[in-house]
Image (spheres, grey):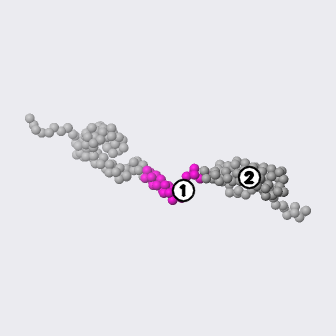
Amino acid sequence: MDNKEKSPSRSLTTDGDYGVNAVELAVWCDITVKTVNEYVHKGIFNRVGPNLFALRANVISYLRSLRRSASGRSGESGVERGKLLAAQARIAEIKEAQMRGERVHKEDVIAEWSNVIRQIRSRMLALPSRLGGRLPHLTPADRAEIDAEIRAILTELGDYNSFADDGYVPVDLRPAPTPATEPMDRDDDQAA
């Protein structure tokens, strides 16, 4: 009896490397056969024949891919890692700006402005009765007219769409001229 070790029959590839099947390559790389097939599709492992892999070349390729992914330079995972790091940096910047008081939450701004607008509205609606107390010559009809005008203005402002179709707020916020405040033409002034 021979005391020689029995080794699996391996064929040599054209470049002198040992040819192994997917199971043997999986054992050498400590991965599953399924992972071997995935790496074939990713281009990490290359076949030299049907179910035949060059052992040394594929192990080297596998080690290089592990080094690339560990250093963050591997194809897709490197890009994804870069995106993740950029997003994490952006989140850290936002949190830091919030801590310094340079950024506030949208909900906080909306709540604060809602309070301001409610206060303005209630004070505007109280204006006719306040004026009635200070200006005794105002008749109830005058106060009713002031009240109606204030309510009309508040209604108009309540219907104001601050987000136009193009997303911009109109720049010209001057009130439209009324017939009583429209400037007279010089010709009309001179004719009188």
Q: Is residue 1 above or below residue 122?
A: above
Q: Is residue 101 left or right of residue 39?
A: right
Residue positioned 81% across, 58% down in the render: 135
Q: Residues within 10 Å of mark 2 (few under 14, many from 20)?
A: few
Which corner quadrant of the image does residue 175 belong to?
Answer: bottom right
Q: Position of residue 144 (x, y in %)?
A: 80, 50
Q: Position of residue 90 (x, y in %)?
A: 47, 54
37 left or right of 190 in image: left
Q: Which sits in the foreground, 8 or 79?
A: 79
Residue at the spot of label 2? 126
Q: Amino acid at mark 2?
A: Ala
Q: Earlier in the sequence, mark 1 or mark 2?
A: 1
| Mark 1, secondary structure of its residue | loop
Mark number, residue 189: none
* Stretch of the chain drawn in magenta: 83-110
- Secondary structure found at label 2: helix
Residue 79 in view: no
Q: Where is the C terminus found, in terms of image quarters? A: bottom right
Q: Looking at the rendered structure, which numbered label has been put on residue 103?
A: 1
Q: Position of residue 2 (x, y in %)?
A: 10, 37
Q: Which residue occupies 70% across, 48% down?
A: 159
Q: Is residue 135 visible?
A: yes
Q: Position of residue 5 (x, y in %)?
A: 14, 39
Q: Quadrant of residue 6?
A: top left
Residue 29 sits in which quadrant? top left
